[in-house]
Amino acid sequence: MYHYDKSFGSRLADAVILIILLAATFISLFPVLNSLSVSFSEKAAVSAGKVTLFPVDFSLANYRTLMGDSQFFVSFGVSVRRVLLGGAIQFILTLMMAFALSRAPQRFKGRNFYMWALVIAMLFSGGLIPWYVTIRSVGLTDTIWALVLPGAVPVFNVILLMNFFRGLPRDLDEAAMMDGAGPWRMLFTIYLPLGLPAIATVTLLSIVGHWNAFFDGLILIHSVDKMPLQTYINTFLLQPAQMEDMDPETLKALMQTSDQGLNAAKIMVSMIPILMVYPFLQRYFIHGIVLGSVKE
């Protein structure tokens, strides 16, 4: 049996690539490991900046305090509703727009006009102030709709899914039309099942985008009980006035925590839903990105 021996240059190149990949992996994981260590460390160690990759003076005080923070779980529920509502709206609109735009210009007369409108909207925006004024003028501020409707059509996802649909054999369309299938039946019986890799990809992008978004909640939501989770974490600050109304046990627990440690605990808990969803969609992710990013 023929045995291929790599040259010294090839082995050296493989070693360099491996080192670079390991370094990139470490750089990517370091913030997560640091936040995890901070969340399990004592207040004094965190304040002194002694925590890096491992907890210092292991403590569960931050998580005990977190369990008593009712607003955290209220904001958690707001983010869950945002993901479910916003994800469903984005899924429906992205799927229908991508299917329509994947049709040939002869079958969809206005295709090129709508395609250029989407590309221009993706590349250029009216600015933050017109965006806010428009949302306020239609009465969406301080509601869940302000978090889901302005981004209801993610243009990048539409283009990604459209290119995937355009890569499917046209013989499927012709066979379906010969059997008397209309556009809706073609979409749900042919394109939806065959497009699962790309659909799973855009769904994952939508879920992660809604879950991690904080800036729109910072501007559009004025009531604390309507803030999404990431906005609440970003704006968290323990106020002295709040401490005066706390019972001795809660106050004692807070004195054992720091804003940095408590925020780290909140960040780690907020990562759990994404870590639970990602493994189910990960096998489609790279496949869908590759197939939807090139055009035949």
Image: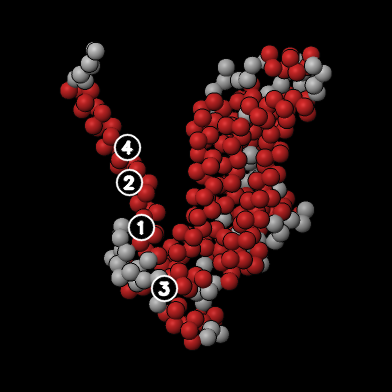
Marked residue nearer the N-terminal end (4 or 2): 4
Query: What amino acid is found at the position of numbered circle 3 in the picture?
Result: Ala
Q: Position of residue 217 (x, y in %)?
A: 61, 58
- Label 3, label 4: how far apart the Cα atoms are: 36 Å
Label 1 sits on what residue type? Answer: Asn
**Badge 4: residue crowd in 10 Å (few <14, some 14–19, many ≥20):** few
Q: Residue placed at 61% from the left, 25% from the top?
A: 163
Regarding mark 3 in the picture, which secondary structure is present there? helix
Q: Nearer the viewer, residue 274 or 260?
A: 274
User: What is the secondary structure assignment of the residue under circle 2?
Assistant: helix
Which residue is denoted by mark 1 in the rendering?
34
**Residue 236 against residue 1 in the figure, above or below:** below
Quadrant including the N terminus:
top left
Indicate which disc residue 275 carries: none
Residue 95 appears at what percent x and percent y? 69, 34
Residue to which mark 2 is pinned: 26
Residue 224 lies left or right of residue 107; in this view the side is: left
Mark 1–mark 2 Cα distance, whole angstroms, equals 11 Å
Marks 4/1: CA–CA distance:
20 Å
Residue at the spot of label 3: 61
On the image, numbered disc 4 is attached to which residue?
Answer: 21
The amino acid marked with disc number 4 is: Leu
Q: Earlier in the sequence, mark 3 or mark 1?
A: 1
- Does residue 36 appear left or right of residue 239 in this picture? left
